[in-house]
Image (spheres, helix red, strand yellow):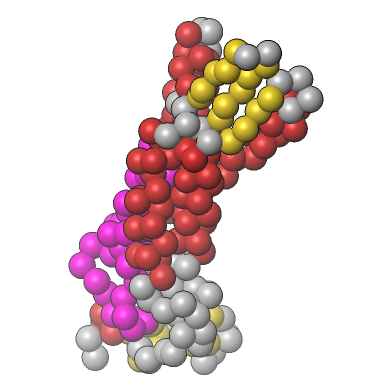
Amino acid sequence: MDPDSMLTCRLCGKQHRAVSLQPGERALCLRCGAVVARLSLLGPRATLVFAVTGLVLAPPAALLTFVTAGKVGAVRLSLLFTGPAGLWDGGMRSLAILVVLCGGLFPLALLATLAAAPAPRRPGLTVAGFEPLVRIAGFLEHWAIPEVQVLAVLVAYMKLGSVVNVSFGPGFWCYGAMALSLLAAQHSLVLEPNGPSAAP
Ligand SMILES: [Zn+2]
């Protein structure tokens, strides 16, 4: 039998003939009962849809007003990377680079990787380039943390809200939606080289 159409249990190593799954179904190992394949309730295209949505939201998130802060007539507009620029100017360059990477470049790279690596239509089938892309995504997911930046802005809003007038701009909402799209894309794909099917 074509080894590309076999499913191997990650726990006990038993090989199984690949089967077709319906959305929401799981395939269990005959020997140990471990899950060897799952298919997302939303279907194999869910990862691609969420990832492309995140990529579409990224440019407005970076270019539109992120936060507006002002008091007594003086208003200051901030963009997504205004904060890291301030850190850079203040001498905290390592932190500025880390914020740009973890809040901007790595999330973008992860979205692009997930968009390029949609799950195979059937567990056990291999798609050219799928596993290397999943390995790259597995690395990037540890560093792409836009949700942390969203939480940091919300905490700052609660701290400063009583001192100055703070309001969120369209860039913030686009960034928040991009972060949610990234989380949805990640959770609709199992980032394991030996588990090529999508997870619910
Ligand atoms: Zn097993």
Up/down of 178 relative to 52, above or below: above
Using the image as rendered, state which of residue 72 and residue 8 is in the foreground. 72
Up/down of 29 relative to 103, above or below: below
Q: Position of residue 71 (x, y in %)?
A: 67, 16
- The quadrant in which residue 73 appears is top right
Q: Position of residue 194 (x, y in %)?
A: 40, 70
Relative side of 56 to 152, left or right: left
Most distant residue in the right direction: 162
Up/down of 96 relative to 171, above or below: above
What's the residue at 75%, 32% (across, down)? Answer: 158
Using the image as rendered, state which of residue 2 and residue 102 is in the foreground. 102
- The quadrant in which residue 131 appears is bottom left
One can see residue 13 in this view: no
Using the image as rendered, state which of residue 30 and residue 70 is in the foreground. 70
Relative side of 115 to 161, left or right: left
Q: Position of residue 47 (x, y in %)?
A: 40, 66
Is 132 colored magenta in this rendering?
yes
Using the image as rendered, state which of residue 33 and residue 157 is in the foreground. 157
Is 179 colored magenta in this rendering?
no
Count of labels shown?
0
Q: Position of residue 23 (x, y in %)?
A: 46, 85
What's the residue at 46%, 49% (across, down)? Answer: 178
Up/down of 173 relative to 65, above or below: below
Q: Which quadrant is home to the N terminus?
A: bottom left
One can see residue 174 in this view: yes
Most distant residue in the front direction: 73
What's the residue at 42%, 89% (across, down)? Answer: 21
Instruction: Give the magenta-colored segment's residue range.
Output: 105-134
What's the residue at 34%, 58% (across, down)? Answer: 52
